Amino acid sequence: MDGTSPSAPVETTLPASGRSFAGAAHVVFRRRADRTEIADLYQQSPLRVLFPATPDDPLPLAVLANSAGGLVGGDRMSASVRAEEGAAAVVTMQAAEKVYRSTGAVTAVSNLLSVAPDGWLEWLPQETIVFDQARLRRTMRIDLEGGAAVLAGEILVFGRAARGERMLSGLVRDAWEVRHSGRLIWADALHLDGEVAMALADPACFAGGIGYATLIYAADDAAGRLDSLRDALGGGDMHAATCMGPLLVARWLSREPHRLRDAFARAWCVLRKSRGLPGQLPRIWHV
């Protein structure tokens, strides 16, 4: 994976500092007897994969950690996770990811999730904080086979809200693709370029929101989860959920990212419980 999408080729100019890296991780989970175990693991610095114990949750947890402490222009980061037939696992991030100001080069992030029949995979990264004048292109592709299910989400924060900073200009492209049995069932992309602050302030766009979250639930029983998901959505200034065949999509916008994070987490827990799993997030989310 190289962080590209068919409609948005990635720029390759390196930052003036010359500092850039290509981190990567690949994890495969498989089912053996009555438990899920790690079948394959590859990691390339500065991206590391940790596997803490999960005494309060029956599913194994993989934690992605960027030891570089953030991303700058020219950096590449890619992750692929596969759940084999009947396997179930959770993937999260060690902390919020920071995308720093760029001198012109793009930061490219690409993620691929694939789930075999009767598999279950959760992709639950913490926030991505995009600094002023950052340039980020991120892609997420999800491939599901028959009977597979996935719960995946992302949270974007435009600027360091805790310090009163805002993203005024730059590039953010966040693209999703979901395929079921090889057929594309959903594609979506957020694209902000140039004077980002204007779009964030515009009542017809973000209406002052600086936190933006997407949650998807793809499974054969998606339609039956829509009402309970909508009941759990509150907490952002704007929020909505819809169902398209085997896919639920929920979105939030908020001027207060911490409220959005709480609402996102609440909806996540509701969908987990509907699968017979504990209605809780990994402990690292509360550190």
Image (tube, helix red, strand yellow):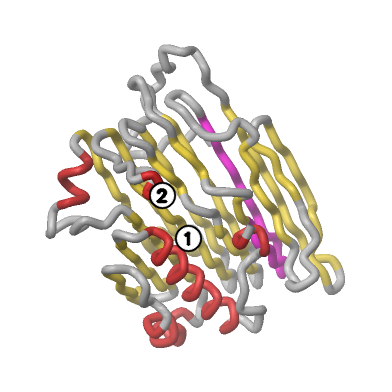
Q: Is residue 282 above or below residue 46?
A: below
Q: Residue at x 55, y 76 (%)?
A: 269
Q: Residues at badges 2 and 1 in contact (C-beta under 8 Å)?
A: no
Q: Nearer the viewer, residue 237 or 66?
A: 237
Give residue 10's quadrant in the image: top left
Residue 30: x percent and y percent?
Answer: 76, 60
What is the three-letter code of the residue carrying label 1?
Gly
Left or right position of 151 against 9: right
Q: For the view shown, which residue lies furthest in the right direction?
A: 33
Left or right: where does residue 209 sit relative to residue 155?
Answer: left
Q: Is residue 89 magenta?
A: yes
The percent coordinates of residue 260 (x first, y second) are 39, 65
Residue 285 covered by magenta stretch: no
Q: Which residue is mark 1?
A: 153
Give the left or right position of residue 1, taking residue 225 as reference: right
Q: Compared to 165, does 255 lie above or below?
A: below
Q: CA distance from mark 2 to mark 1?
A: 22 Å
Name the quadrant of the N terminus.
top right
Question: Which residue is found at the position 70% from the left and 60% from the top?
Answer: 84
Residue 75 sits above or below residue 51 on the image: above
Q: Residue at x 51, y 30 (%)?
A: 76
Q: Residue at x 72, y 66 (%)?
A: 87
Q: Residues within 10 Å of mark 2 (few under 14, many from 20)?
A: few
Q: Secondary structure at mark 2?
A: helix
The answer to which of 225 and 259 lies nearer the viewer is 259
Nearer-the-camera pick, 261 or 223: 261
Q: Position of residue 285 (x, y in %)?
A: 60, 60
Magenta span covers which residues? Answer: 76-91
Residue to which mark 2 is pinned: 162
Query: Looking at the figure, which quarter contains the C terminus?
Result: bottom right
Q: Alpha-carbon neighbours of circle 1 within 10 Å: few (<14), some, or many (≥20)?
A: many
Check disc 1 and report its element: helix, strand or loop.
strand
